[in-house]
Image: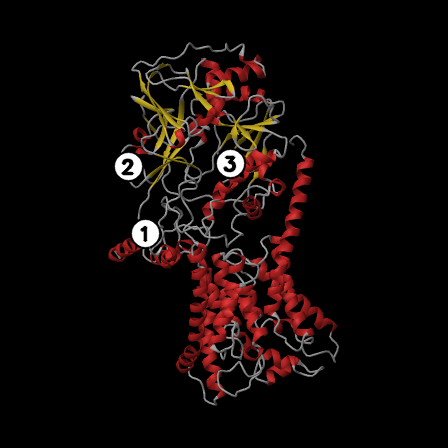
Amino acid sequence: MARCIRIRKGRNLPLTGEAGRQWRDCRIPSVVRVPFYEFTAQDFRFLVQPHDRVLLGSPLLQKRNNPALVIVSPVSGRVTGIVRGERRIPEYLEIKTDIRQETVTPRPFSPERLPHLDRDEIIARMLEGGVWPFVCQRPFGRMADPSVLPQAVFVRAMDTSPLAPDINMILQGQEDDFLLGLSLVRRLTTGSTYLCHGPEAASRAIGDFPGIERAVFRGPHPAGNTGTHVHHLFSLSRGKVVWTFDVQDVIAVARLFREGVFCPWRVVALTGEGLPPDRRGYVRVMAGTPLESLTGAINPQAKVVAGNALWGVLREKSSGLGFMTNQLTILPGGSGRKFLGWLAPGENLFSFRRLFLSSFLPGTFFKMEICLNGSPRAIVLNDVYDDLVALDVLTFFLIKAILAGEIEEMERLGILECSPEDFALAAFACPSKTDIPALIARGLELMEKEGI
Amino acid sequence: MRFLRKIFDCAGEVFRPGRPLERLFPLFEAVDTFLFTPGETPRCAPFVRDAADLKRVMVTVIAALLPSALFGIYNTGYQAILASGKEPALMEAMMLGAHIVLPIILVSYLAGGFWEVLFACVRKRTISEGFLVTGLLFALTLPATIPLWQVAVGVSFGVVIGKEVFGGTGMNLVNPALAGRAFLFFAYPASISGDTVWVAVDGVTRATPLSVVASAPAGTNPVELLVSRGYDWSALFFGFCPGSIGETSRLACCVGLGVLLIAGVASWRIVVGCVLGLLAVSGLLLFFAGPQASAFMRLPPYWHMVLGSFAFGAVFMATDPVSSAATSFGRWVYGFCIGALVVVIRVFNPAYPEGTMLAILLMNIFAPLLDFVAVEWHVTRRNHRLQGAKGGR
């Protein structure tokens, strides 16, 4: 039986620009740009040089302190360049794709063998197969360390963030892979494995399975955040570690074991008001695909976010799709500076507080631009945050402790349960435009460096 | 507007680092973002932000203060004309009131604004909009006869010692407007207390309802006394009585409270706490009051609510989010103690019955302690939960 957990804190953002339910086509691009922003690229060593030939599934990078951990090529072709950014940190690797895609020799497990693999075998295959970077470890939300034993594994089969992809669309046609993946990641822990989903999950892949504890999270965003799930099902504190997966990560693990070769394909939702409605939708696409080939020509003022409007990374249109991206949000921008904006009645401006006419008008959805909507100031309204953070944390006091660098106080206030993502909604609402996720990240970094 | 924008874009160059007017950049930024929304784009998540910024919040607080300010202007004129023996007409009273009150507001803004800009420029940080509220609040807590130089001195003390020495807006311990008023109260008591300062006509003495009750001999029925002086409950509620400029109309305070609560800017816990504290303590005192008790002790709780600056203080001063407690528990206690202290000061300190200012300042000082208790409580609860869930549930 599933546990039902109702989240009362939080709010949904009424953004326009839904993906709809249509599937779009995407062909293998002639050039892919494999980006590294999802990993700390400094921790990796390149295994390929420009002009080398790579196959789908052949290793591109290797972790410096654990050579078994590799990131593999999503495509077969020839490396044409390694592009580095500030301080020579590698940004992406450009590969010119072959017309006929070739893979490394597949090493699948037979269906009879799959249920009997033990933890070490699974981890070893995940490491060399290139799916290990998908495993996220908490506290600190880093790439998992294969040498630790997590107390629990969390699989997140829901997303409540603005314009988030529908879980049923993602699972469509991949139900068996998901179930296989679930049975594999379950064996990574000796503790419980939690499958967390929302009330809207209708796929046959979501159900009661042996060894899996199912939990239904109802309520507004951030009910779908991993941080919320971990907080409500498991108490993360010093000395405890959990590993977390997204649906598509689990599917990627399953396909590696079933087909014997890395699967670079992901379902990505193309959303956002900056994209014309006929180009929004879902697309099955390969990691590294240049974003411009997915979005087409868009307004030069519009910005592409890998992720959603609340939590993601701003990406250039020419850059490639990341390995773990489920959603692209194209946000309109650049309507410029408005004269006496603080005096505007604001019939089309969205705010959680009733400070604009829009709060008193019917009309439920808003077109939001990529904009700070104000300038950074000292925190004045300090009661904004707690209703929007679905953790048992006093946000304002946690921020104070972080700013003061008080490691012990930070831990007492529960920073180990936090990840910057959980505070995105609080940062959205803050009238002083405080960058709370960045502060939380700073606190976690301090904690990791000195506290534990 | 494009033309104006272009002028500002050109002028802005002179204020960039390394240019001659670099030092005055905060002033430029303030004017620039006052005229045009900043239009900055965030470089990291979240990429969309709530449309409300601090400017909008502060403008809303000022809008909430407007009824009090307007009625204050009217009542100042009304009381002055009444004292000179004429029947006050609306427009006449407004004009006279504006003539008296607007200079006070203006001086408060100018003198306080000067310090705000000076500190921002020296510290190289932006000018906070919070001052727009402080400047008006401070002016509204003063009697209409206050000399303008004292306004300037008081607001300077409030802004510099009450706020800037702690690091500016958001870091202050006490409400800057009240700090300024407290300074005036102790430095120049003759201009801010007594019976001669409330009506802006020379030589006219008129006691505020508060001092009417305070000076009554023990055993007097306070309600009869007030009504006999022309202060029935509704007159006090609507605000036709002498007092500080903004405090007299409790109706205007209620309207302001409505605006603040609907907008979600003020904490309802504090306001409810204030009212509960006042009702509880005054009710308790009334319950124990014998026939020979002091007049204040025998005053019914609902009369306490329309006396003095309780309403104004509870709505606009106590709810200042920076100097009040920041936890829910802290806010309840903070509000309750303010309401209770107001009554305690009224009843047991007949020399100076107006206790709202001191009650709020005192609780401002105690707010961090209340928060400390609430945070410790929270941490204890957390630790219990974590221990109860060894190895996960």
Residue B262 image point, x, y percent: 48, 58
Q: Is residue A32 left or right of residue A154?
A: left
Callouts 3 and 2 close, C-beta under 8 Å: no
Q: Which residue is mark 2?
A: A298
Q: Residue at x 52, y 67 (%)?
A: B157
Badge 1 density bin: few <14, some 14–19, many ≥20, Cα 10 Å: some
The amino acid at mark 2 is: Ile
Pick the front one: A203 or A413: A413
Question: In x, y percent, where is residue A284?
Answer: 37, 25
**Mark 2 chain:** A
Q: Residues within 10 Å of mark 2 (few under 14, many from 20)?
A: some
User: Decide: marks 2, 1 in contact (CB < 8 A)?
Assistant: no
Which amino acid, by three-letter code, is at mark 1?
A: Arg
Q: How is the image coloured?
A: secondary structure
**Residue at x 32%, y 56% (from the top left corner):** A339
Q: In the image, which is nearer the foreground, mark 1 or mark 3?
A: 1
**Residue A440 versus residue B16: which sits nearer the camera?**
B16
Q: Quadrant of residue A34?
A: top left
| SS state under label 3 | loop
Q: Amino acid at mark 3?
A: Asn
Q: Name the image quarter holding the C terminus of chain B.
A: top right
Residue A62 x %, y % = 46, 19
Chain-order first, disc 3 or disc 2: 3
Disc 3 target residue: A225
The residue that disc 1 covers is A337
Residue at position x 51%, y 44% in the image: A10
Between the C-alphas of marks 1 and 3, the distance is 34 Å
